[in-house]
Amino acid sequence: MKGSDVSKEKPSKKNTSLRLESNMLKALKIRAIEEDSSVQVILERLVEEYLNTPGKQKKSKK
């Protein structure tokens, strides 16, 4: 997926789970409500931005 634009791929969603500190999740939920959004939409946007940002170049072994 290196250099790919995730938003252009066929939309199909899978479930996943993750662990967040309880205070972080609470703040995220509050922010989602304030922005009339959802935790899912916020996380999808953040992951998409992250994946569309060029990563570090791997150092070659000499």
Image (cartoon, rainbow, N blue to C red):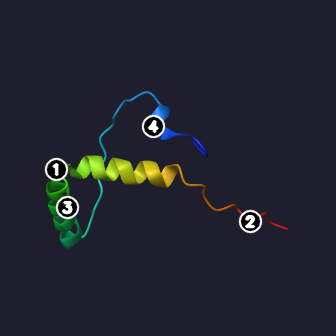
Residue denoted by label 2 = 59
How far is disc 4 from disc 3 in space, using C-alphas? 23 Å
The answer to whether the residue labelled 4 contacts the one labelled 1, judged by CB atoms less than 8 Å apart, is no
Q: Callout 2, which amino acid?
A: Lys
Give the residue drawn at x 19%, y 72%.
23
Please name which of the two marks, 2 or 4, marks the residue nearer to the observer. 4
Could you tell which of marks 1 and 2 lies nearer the N-terminus? Answer: 1
Residue 52 in the image: state x and y as whole percent: 53, 49
How far is disc 3 from disc 2 in space, using C-alphas? 39 Å
| Quadrant containing the N terminus in the rendered view | top right
In this view, 2 is above or below 60: above
How far is disc 2 from disc 4 in space, using C-alphas? 29 Å
Please name which of the two marks, 1 or 2, marks the residue nearer to the observer. 1
| Quadrant containing the C terminus in the rendered view | bottom right
Residue 36 in the image: state x and y as whole percent: 16, 50
The answer to whether the residue labelled 1 contacts the one labelled 2, judged by CB atoms less than 8 Å apart, is no
Q: Callout 3, which amino acid?
A: Arg
Q: Callout 4, which amino acid?
A: Ser
Residue denoted by label 1 = 36
* Mark 3 element type: helix
Residue denoted by label 4 = 7
